[in-house]
Image (cartoon, helix red, strand yellow):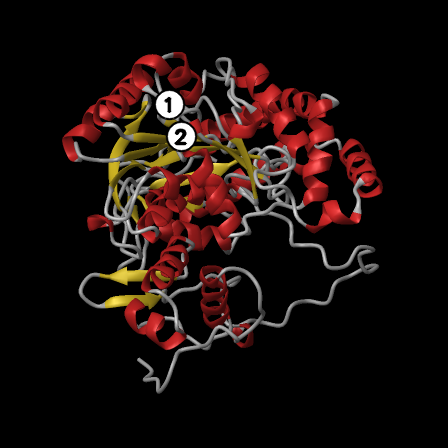
């Protein structure tokens, strides 16, 4: 182990820009990728990192949490947090890699484009489904029509024509009736979810989160000084009865009721009603994270929790905050999200949005309002749903043919990805301290496949950020952004990876 004198790095290493948490995450990731922090090296404690870099400890632990979830770091009980020993080629220090072969043929005509997204990365919308011409026309008209003053900053809740368009769209497509003034436009789903959690609970409060569930939710709850309480989720969604047994005094529940992340299940009506009844009984709040936008394949998109809550508002009060966005609906680079808040939280929500300058680009807001008003969003959703259905069926067929005996897909009625569990009874090759599904992720990356460990969606024991997760072993496989031929080719490579790392059976390829 190397010894170090002085801080590990500073926030001025590398580039600038972004939040302090994002900058720390980028600096640490760059230090690992370039060999400044070597494989197997122990990192300073989060308290030391925070002190050396002039940050809050919550910021430091949130960055470590993300690096652990993405496979750069691992936590060893009683020893600390370490860079993983066997970094895949894509992660390895640049000087240790073999020189890249010189490209053959003509140089690409478009420079500076990001690398293609690898299959099976989850949560990515299909860019090939967007009506690019309609979106380009909307953007062009926005640039021509907006005044210089309008470009300076949007209004307090967001661009009003977009809020009006969204109110109509939500009522028509999801049965959610709200006034445009209840809608806040925000710069991305993470910002919307962060604001919602800060509105709905206070530091020290206990918060129900889904287990398995979105790592971002867990990290945001911790960052805001609250205590996440992982509540088991299954084919019917989060179980309120188990939540009450675990934390009857919780003040908030954060759920992905319409498309559970990562399982892709839809919360049953019985559990929706039970969750809302609990919130009314104990004077708690519910945040409905609807980031996947209601992509369901076996039934119509279900009624939102907020619409059910408002239907019984006289008895229950308005308990639900609804979060939605467009990065998983239209394309990942469109960082526009929205938060629908109950009337009693609206003034505070507007104050916090202004205080933290949570503004979204006005040009994109204006273009999106036109895109919705002219029916392009509704057409896009219908077209994408059919395409995603075909890609989903391709993945399911590949799983039956190629992965039998090693991976089993869990039934999923919604979303952009599916979860698959590793078959019990197999022995998996993994480095000491590395879970089988994390080891498979590293091996798959060497074959240009991007799978996400299912265990990374489980909260660490004791709720500690950066802790080693020991939940259900499996993989989360995104399919929406990939054509059927690419899914089949990647499925074959994954079958080869599984066969090389499992003993006790073989894949069926």
- The residue under the point 26% across, 49% down is 460
Residue 489: image location, x then y, percent: 59, 39
Quote the CA–CA distance across marks 1 and 2: 8 Å
Which of the pair 85/50 is nearer the observer?
50
Q: Secondary structure at mark 2?
A: helix
Indicate the position of residue 405 as horizontal and vertical percent values: 35, 33
Q: Nearer the viewer, residue 124 or 462?
A: 462
User: Mark 1 packing: few (<14 Cα in 10 Å), some, or many (20+)?
Assistant: many
The reply to whether discs 1 and 2 touch (Cβ–Cβ < 8 Å) is yes
Where is residue 443 drawn, in percent x and y? 44, 54
The answer to whether residue 28 is above or below residue 3 is above
Give the labeled residue for mark 2.
344
Disc nearest the viewer among 1 and 2? 2
Q: In the rendered image of this protein, does residue 460 appear above or below residue 72?
A: above
Left or right position of 114 against 422: right
Residue at image location 50% in from the left, 60% down from the top: 19
Q: How many marks?
A: 2
Q: Which mark is first along the chain, 2 or 1?
A: 1
| Residue, far left | 245
Q: Which residue is the site of mark 1?
A: 318
Q: For the N terminus, which image quadrant?
A: bottom left
Residue 376 visible at all: yes
């Amino acid at each position: 182990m190397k010894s170090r004198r002085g801080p590990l790095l500073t926030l001025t290493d590398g580039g600038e820009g972004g939040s302090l948490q994002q900058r720390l995450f980028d600096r640490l990731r760059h230090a690992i990728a370039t060999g400044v922090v070597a494989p197997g090296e122990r990192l300073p404690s989060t308290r030391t990192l925070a002190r050396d870099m002039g940050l809050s400890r919550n910021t430091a632990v949130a960055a470590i949490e993300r690096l652990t979830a993405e496979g750069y770091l691992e936590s060893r009980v009683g020893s600390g947090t370490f860079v993983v020993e066997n970094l895949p080629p894509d992660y390895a220090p640049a000087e240790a890699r073999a020189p890249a072969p010189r490209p053959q043929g003509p140089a690409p005509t478009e420079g500076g484009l990001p690398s293609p997204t690898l299959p099976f990365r989850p949560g990515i919308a299909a860019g090939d489904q967007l009506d690019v011409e309609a979106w380009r026309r909307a953007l062009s008209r926005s640039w021509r029509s907006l005044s210089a003053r309008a470009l300076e900053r949007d209004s307090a809740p967001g661009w009003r024509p977009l809020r009006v368009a969204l109110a109509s769209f939500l009522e028509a497509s999801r049965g959610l009736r709200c006034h445009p003034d209840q809608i806040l436009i925000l710069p991305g789903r993470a910002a919307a979810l962060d604001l919602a959690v800060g509105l709905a609970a206070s530091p020290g409060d206990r918060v129900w989160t889904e287990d398995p569930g979105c790592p971002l939710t867990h990290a945001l709850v911790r960052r805001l000084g609250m205590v996440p309480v992982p509540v088991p989720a299954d084919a019917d969604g989060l179980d309120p009865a188990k939540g009450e047994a675990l934390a009857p005094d919780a003040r908030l529940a954060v759920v992905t009721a319409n498309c559970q992340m990562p399982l892709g299940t839809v919360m049953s009506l019985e559990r929706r009603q039970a969750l809302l009844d609990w919130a009314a009984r104990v004077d708690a709040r519910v945040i409905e994270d609807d980031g996947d936008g209601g992509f369901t394949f076996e039934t119509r998109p279900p009624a939102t929790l907020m619409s059910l809550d408002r239907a019984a508002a006289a008895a229950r009060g308005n308990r639900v905050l609804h979060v939605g966005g467009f990065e998983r609906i239209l394309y990942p680079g469109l960082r526009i999200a929205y938060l629908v808040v109950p009337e009693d939280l609206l003034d505070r929500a507007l104050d916090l949005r202004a205080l933290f300058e949570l503004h979204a680009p006005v040009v994109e807001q204006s273009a999106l309002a036109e895109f919705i008003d002219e029916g392009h969003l509704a057409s896009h959703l219908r077209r994408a749903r059919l395409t995603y259905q075909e890609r989903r069926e391709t993945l399911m067929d590949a799983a039956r043919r190629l992965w039998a005996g090693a991976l089993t897909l869990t039934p999923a009625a919604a979303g952009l990805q599916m979860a698959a569990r590793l078959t019990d009874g197999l022995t998996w090759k993994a480095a000491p301290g590395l879970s089988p599904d994390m080891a498979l992720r590293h091996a798959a990356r060497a074959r240009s496949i991007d799978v996400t460990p299912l265990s990374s969606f489980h909260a660490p024991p004791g709720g500690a950020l950066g802790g080693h997760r020991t939940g259900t072993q499996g993989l989360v496989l995104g399919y929406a952004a990939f054509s059927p031929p690419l899914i089949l080719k990647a499925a074959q490579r994954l079958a080869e990876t599984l066969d090389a790392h499992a003993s006790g059976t073989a894949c069926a390829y």
